[in-house]
Image (cartoon, grey):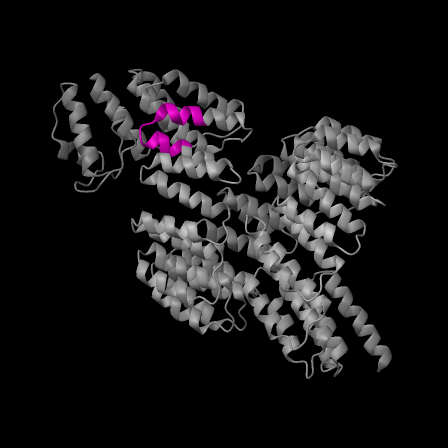
């Protein structure tokens, strides 16, 4: 029995290390068949196994089956919960623990440090918890230094470092990295030189911190100072070059490596593929000595993520071998691009078309493109369903308002996880049925902050401010998302003063809360207040810049919009499709045709952004306003989109102003009465009076329907 127990323990550990949930369930079943399911040692290992596989519900089920859980049982379960996204549940479990040791406190502190990585508030909550800890060991202090460094609160990190009874190489590295990441290179250099010892992690962390702040010369100098350039160090430097866009230096460093490991090969392959150098990526793929499909899949995933379907197809066609991940990636990429026939062809050609992951990729493709009947047909053909497949189908029904079918699937699920519950709650909230979502929330076996926030957002966006406020008060714990939702709810209700009050009272703010307050002011025309919020933001990104550019353009301050756009470029922030929509709109409304052309060319040529229909419409509108109607029509005819209302109305407006009208301009399909009136005005201005109702009928218009104008 002892020998079998040892073998089973090894199998459980291996399944956990492999992060394979299917294998984990198989080993679990084997343990139960051997009548060792009540063995506390094996139960502890299985909790850890499921935790590593991300199967929190199953880990908790095993934990709850332990007759007398010891401190190891509690800590293993706590660590499993700490790896999830549910901070509230983790805190609740920590508070239930009958006894806690240093492992418990450190696990909870690390969770607090990691729970808000995108916002300014990360270290506030962690710092409060740190101060409550009975003992501050090296592990806890180092975790706190890392969190404070992430928040650029270097002085507080230095205080903790100086107060430590003893520092090891990890704490020295954390403090040095925090200084480098904050931009204080002189202090970082002095700290680095004072270190009693350095290891590989120290060098790599320092190089990465410098590279992330775009201090590439300093990163290169650090690399050159290293006593030996092993693969670990070279990979760090290649990563630094890659992140700065210096592919030539990355290749040179790669070529200088004595031993090129799989990490280095993958870095070069994925970087070249994602930057459009597909031939070079393929050459690297064929040259790698590692006979592994993983780098090929990494290249496929990178290309698919960037919408480079043609390039992904080239890589896929040349793959020497493919696994189910390869097929799933390509099916998903084609479906994402709307090419369902190609996706279905790949699905049929797949060597394992009934594989759960491959089938779910095809199912998701149908669902994403609104093909509910085909999605359900494939779903019914599947030999079995896991939680992901069922949740995908529920989401498809919910997104198209078919709540009866979504509820029926949810009701018949043999096992539901937190994601499935939240999906069903979101289905009700997104279909303006927030009260039903609240009922479902109350039926959940275990709540999460996501669940509460989903219902809260349903009340908010349904305009039920009073009910949203009541729910916010009842919430067991409000996070930065909760406050941001209430901020948006107040703004939607026109309560700007209340929105500002909530914003000022927030214990912590993340990027979303700053953006929300900025947009609140911008949409209500309070551009001075919007600019003040923008100036106060701890970190600005393309979203905040674009919001300010677009709001100035929308309220007629087009010169300010152009200046802001140029400032954004000077700050090194790359504009996106939405940014260019804002600036093209500004140029259009001021009649600056030359600037409109210039920005359009820069978008395509300098930033490699594919023009959207809105961009073509702005350009056509600017040409029309300038009286260059033939060129405006040419832009409309050559754009790779069907004409929409905005394009039609801008052309008709230009025709009316300049007294020209063409039959080909009046191709409006299923538009409203306002469009019919505009057609009549255009014809009248050209001296060709015609009954607008007759013309509307000929154009397929239905009198009484409304139309949105772009001008």
Q: Nearer the viewer, residue 270 or 238?
A: 238
Magenta part of the chain: 549-564
Say which residue appears at 17% left-offset and 18% top-offset: 686
| Image-quadrant location for residue 440 | bottom left
Quadrant location, the N terminus: bottom right
| Image-quadrant location for residue 221 | top right
Q: Nearer the viewer, residue 654 or 48?
A: 48
Q: Nearer the viewer, residue 653 or 81?
A: 81
Quadrant location, the C terminus: top left
Say which residue appears at 52% left-offset and 26% top-offset: 569
Q: Is residue 275 visible?
A: yes
Identify the main secondary structure in magenta: helix
On whether residue 560 falls in the magenta region, the answer is yes
- Residue 162, x across and y down, in percent: 73, 50
Say which residue appears at 84% left-offset and 31% top-offset: 256
Q: Is residue 686 left or right of residue 314?
A: left
């Amino acid at each position: 029995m002892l020998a079998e127990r040892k073998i089973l323990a090894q199998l459980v550990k291996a399944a956990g290390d492999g992060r394979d949930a299917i294998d984990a369930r198989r080993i679990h079943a084997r343990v139960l068949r051997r009548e060792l399911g009540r063995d506390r040692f094996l139960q502890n290992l299985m909790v850890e196994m499921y935790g590593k596989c991300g199967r929190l519900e199953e880990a908790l089920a095993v934990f709850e089956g332990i007759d007398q859980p010891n401190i190891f049982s509690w800590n293993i379960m706590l660590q499993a919960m700490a790896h999830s996204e549910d901070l509230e549940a983790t805190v609740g479990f920590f508070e239930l623990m009958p006894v806690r040791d240093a492992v418990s406190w450190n696990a909870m502190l690390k969770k607090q440090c990691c729970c808000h990585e995108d916002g300014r508030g990360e270290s506030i909550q962690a710092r409060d918890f740190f101060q409550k800890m009975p003992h501050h060991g090296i592990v806890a202090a180092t975790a706190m230094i890392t969190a404070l460094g992430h928040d650029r609160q270097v002085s507080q990190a230095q205080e903790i470092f100086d107060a430590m009874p003893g520092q090891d190489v990890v704490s020295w590295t954390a403090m040095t990295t925090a200084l480098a990441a904050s931009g204080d290179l002189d202090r970082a250099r002095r700290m680095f030189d004072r270190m009693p010892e350095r290891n590989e992690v120290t060098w790599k962390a320092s190089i990465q911190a410098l590279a992330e702040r775009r201090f590439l010369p300093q990163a290169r100098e650090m690399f050159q100072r290293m006593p030996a350039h092993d693969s670990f160090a070279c990979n760090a430097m290649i990563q630094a070059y890659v992140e700065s866009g210096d592919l030539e230096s990355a290749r040179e460093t790669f070529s200088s490596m004595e031993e090129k490991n799989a990490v280095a090969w993958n870095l070069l392959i994925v970087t070249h593929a994602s930057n459009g150098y597909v031939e070079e990526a393929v050459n690297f793929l064929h040259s790698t000595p590692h006979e592994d499909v993983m780098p090929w899949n990494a290249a496929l995933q990178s290309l698919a993520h960037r919408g480079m379907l043609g390039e992904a197809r080239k890589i896929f066609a040349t793959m020497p071998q493919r696994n189910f991940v390869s097929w799933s990636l390509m099916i998903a990429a084609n479906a994402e691009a709307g090419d369902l026939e190609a996706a279905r062809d790949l699905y049929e050609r797949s060597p394992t078309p009934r594989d759960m992951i491959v089938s779910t990729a095809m199912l998701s493709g149908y669902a994403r493109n609104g093909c509910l009947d085909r999605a359900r047909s494939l779903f019914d053909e599947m030999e079995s369903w896991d939680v992901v497949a069922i949740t995908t189908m529920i989401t498809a029904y919910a997104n198209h308002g078919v709540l009866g079918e979504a509820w029926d699937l949810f009701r018949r699920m043999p096992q539901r996880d937190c994601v499935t519950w939240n999906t069903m709650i979101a289905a009700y909230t997104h279909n303006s049925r927030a009260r039903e979502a609240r009922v479902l929330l109350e039926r959940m076996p275990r709540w999460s902050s996501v669940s509460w926030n989903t219902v809260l957002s349903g009340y908010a966006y349904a305009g039920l401010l009073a009910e949203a406020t009541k729910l916010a008060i009842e919430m067991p714990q409000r996070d930065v998302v909760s406050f941001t939702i209430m901020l948006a709810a107040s703004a939607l209700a026109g309560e700007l003063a209340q929105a500002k009050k909530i914003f000022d009272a927030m214990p912590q703010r993340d990027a979303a809360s700053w953006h929300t307050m900025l947009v609140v002011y911008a949409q209500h025309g309070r551009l001075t207040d919007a600019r003040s919020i923008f100036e106060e933001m701890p970190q600005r990104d393309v979203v905040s810049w674009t919001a300010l550019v677009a709001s100035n353009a929308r309220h007629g301050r087009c010169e300010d919009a152009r200046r802001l756009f140029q400032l954004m470029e000077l700050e090194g922030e790359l504009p996106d499709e939405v940014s260019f929509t804002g600036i093209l709109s500004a140029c259009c409304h001021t009649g600056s045709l030359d600037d409109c052309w210039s920005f359009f060319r820069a978008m395509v040529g300098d930033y490699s952004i594919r023009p959207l229909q809105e961009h073509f419409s702005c350009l056509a509108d600017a040409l029309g306003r300038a009286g260059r109607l033939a060129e405006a029509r040419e832009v409309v005819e050559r754009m790779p989109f069907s004409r929409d209302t905005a394009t039609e109305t801008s052309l008709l407006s230009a025709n009316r102003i300049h007294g020209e009208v063409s039959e080909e301009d009046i191709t409006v399909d299923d538009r409203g009465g306002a469009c019919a009136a505009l057609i009549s005005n255009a014809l009248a201005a050209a001296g060709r009076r015609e009954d607008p109702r007759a013309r509307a009928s000929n154009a397929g218009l239905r009198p009484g329907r409304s139309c949105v104008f772009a001008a």
